[in-house]
Image: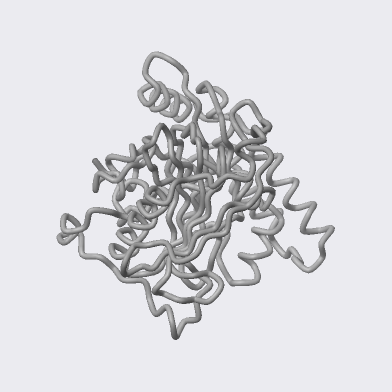
C-alpha cells in the first residue's frame, strides 16, 4: 500500500511515521492500536484526500485569491476571508470517488448498523513542539450515517480556515497549503466516567507527579471548562495517589444531552482509587514510550479504560522539557503503549 496516495487509511494500517498523511492525532491513534492499546477503532480520511478535494473542485485558486495580500490585523477583512473560504469548501460537491471511499470505510467500521462516531480534525503540523495547532480545528461528536460523516469531513476541512487559524499560521510564517488536514473518524465511547491526565503536574511542572481529572459522562464538558472534575495527584514512581480533591457535579453530558445526576452521587468520588491509579499507570507507559510528558484524554466504558487522545505537553519550559524523543520503530515491540490522538470529548 502506498500510504502517500491513499485517501483512506484504517487505524490498523497507521504508524507514527505516517504523520504527514494523517496528522498528529491520526498517527498516534494508529500507533497505539498497533501496540494493542485500548483505543476506539476507526479510520482516517487523509490529507491527500483534502488536497485532491481542493484541486478537483478548483478551490485552491479561490483560497489563494482570498488570502493574497490579506492583512490579518484587520479583523473585519480576516473574518470576511475566513467566511468566504469556509462557505466555498462547504458548498463544493464531494467528488464521487472520494465519497464512495468514505462510505465504504464507514460501513466497514460499523458493520450492519450505523454507529455513532466522532469526526475529528488532525492537522499535519498540529502537535509540533514549537507550534501548537491544537484546538484550532473542529471536532464533531455523535455523528451517525455515512452522509453525515461526509458532511462533517468537509466541515473539518473548512475549519482549517477559521479566522484564528489563518491568523496563527500567518503570524508564525506557516504556508497555508503546507499545513494539511486529515480527518480521523472514530467510534464513540459510551463513557460512564472520563477525564484528562497530564503525566507531569501542570501546576508545578513536577515530572514526578501525574495529574488525573475525572468527571461523570462524556469528557467534552471538562475540556470546555463547564464541569469541575475530581482531581488526583499520583506519585509517578510508586503509582499511588498523593492527594485528591472531590468536586460537586450536578449534571453530565450523555448522548441524550445534559442529564441530571442523582443527588446521592453529586458529591461522591467519581472513580475508585484503584481505577484512578490504573489510569495513571497507563499514562506513565505512554510517556515512557514517547520520552516526553503527555496530555491524555481517556474514558471508561463498562469498566474498561480507553485512551481517546494523547499529545505532547507543549507548555513546559524548553530547558525542562527538551526535545521529543524519536522512537526507533524496530524497538516499538518493547513498549506496551503508544501515545494516541483524537480530540476533545469522548
331 is higher (above) or lower (below) than 110: below
Residue 199 image position (x, y, % from top left): 42, 65
**Residue under the point 63% across and 37% down:** 252
180 relative position to 330: left or right: right
Q: Is residue 127 visible?
A: no
346 relative position to 28: left or right: right
Q: Is residue 213 visible?
A: yes
**Residue under the point 57% across and 25% down:** 148
49 relative position to 140: left or right: left
Looking at this rendering, what residue extends furthest in the front direction? 264
Total residue callouts: 0
**Residue under the point 39% across and 27% down:** 105
**Residue under the point 39% across and 36% down:** 303
24 is higher (above) or lower (below) than 201: above
User: Which of the colour schemes (rainbow, by chain, secondary structure, one colour) is used?
Assistant: one colour
Quadrant location of the N terminus in the rendered image = top left
Residue 225 image position (x, y, % from top left): 67, 53
Residue 50 image position (x, y, % from top left): 50, 43
Image quarter of residue 133 = bottom right
**Closer to the camera in the image, 103 or 216:** 216
Image quarter of residue 157 = top right
**Closer to the camera in the image, 274 or 101:** 274
Residue 114 image position (x, y, % from top left): 47, 18
142 is higher (above) or lower (below) than 17: above
Looking at this rendering, what residue extends furthest in the right direction? 76
Looking at this rendering, what residue extends furthest in the bottom direction? 319
**Closer to the camera in the image, 172 or 207:** 207
Amino acid at each position: 500500500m502506498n500510504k502517500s496516495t491513499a485517501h483512506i487509511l484504517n487505524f490498523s494500517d497507521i504508524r507514527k511515521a505516517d504523520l504527514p498523511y494523517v496528522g498528529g492525532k491520526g498517527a498516534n491513534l494508529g500507533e497505539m492500536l498497533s501496540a494493542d492499546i485500548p483505543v476506539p477503532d476507526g479510520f482516517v480520511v487523509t490529507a491527500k484526500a483534502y488536497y485532491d478535494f481542493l484541486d478537483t473542485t478548483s478551490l485552491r485558486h479561490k483560497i489563494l485569491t482570498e488570502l493574497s495580500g490579506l492583512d490579518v490585523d484587520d479583523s473585519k477583512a480576516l473574518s470576511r476571508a475566513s467566511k468566504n473560504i469556509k462557505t466555498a469548501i462547504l458548498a463544493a460537491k464531494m467528488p464521487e470517488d472520494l465519497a464512495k471511499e468514505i462510505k465504504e470505510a464507514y460501513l466497514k467500521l460499523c458493520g450492519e448498523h450505523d454507529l455513532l462516531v466522532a469526526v475529528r480534525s488532525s492537522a499535519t503540523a498540529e502537535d509540533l513542539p514549537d507550534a501548537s495547532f491544537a484546538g484550532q480545528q473542529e471536532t464533531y461528536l455523535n455523528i451517525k450515517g455515512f452522509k453525515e460523516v461526509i458532511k462533517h469531513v468537509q466541515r473539518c476541512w473548512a475549519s482549517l480556515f477559521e479566522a484564528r487559524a489563518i491568523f496563527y499560521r500567518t503570524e508564525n510564517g506557516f504556508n497555508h497549503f503546507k499545513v494539511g488536514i486529515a480527518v480521523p473518524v472514530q467510534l464513540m465511547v459510551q463513557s460512564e466516567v472520563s477525564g484528562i491526565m497530564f503525566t507531569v503536574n501542570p501546576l508545578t511542572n513536577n515530572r514526578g507527579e501525574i495529574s488525573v481529572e475525572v468527571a461523570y459522562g462524556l469528557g467534552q464538558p471538562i475540556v470546555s471548562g463547564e464541569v469541575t472534575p475530581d482531581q488526583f495527584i499520583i506519585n509517578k514512581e510508586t503509582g499511588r495517589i498523593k492527594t485528591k480533591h472531590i468536586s460537586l457535579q450536578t449534571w453530565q453530558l450523555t448522548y441524550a444531552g445534559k442529564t441530571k445526576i442523582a443527588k446521592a452521587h453529586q458529591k461522591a468520588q467519581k472513580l475508585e482509587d484503584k481505577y484512578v491509579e490504573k489510569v495513571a499507570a497507563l499514562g506513565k507507559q505512554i510517556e515512557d514510550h514517547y520520552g516526553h510528558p503527555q496530555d491524555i484524554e481517556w474514558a471508561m466504558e463498562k469498566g474498561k479504560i480507553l485512551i481517546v487522545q494523547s499529545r505532547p505537553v507543549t507548555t513546559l519550559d524548553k530547558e525542562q522539557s527538551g526535545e521529543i524523543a524519536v522512537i526507533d520503530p524496530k524497538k516499538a515491540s518493547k513498549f506496551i503503549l503508544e501515545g494516541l490522538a483524537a480530540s476533545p470529548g469522548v
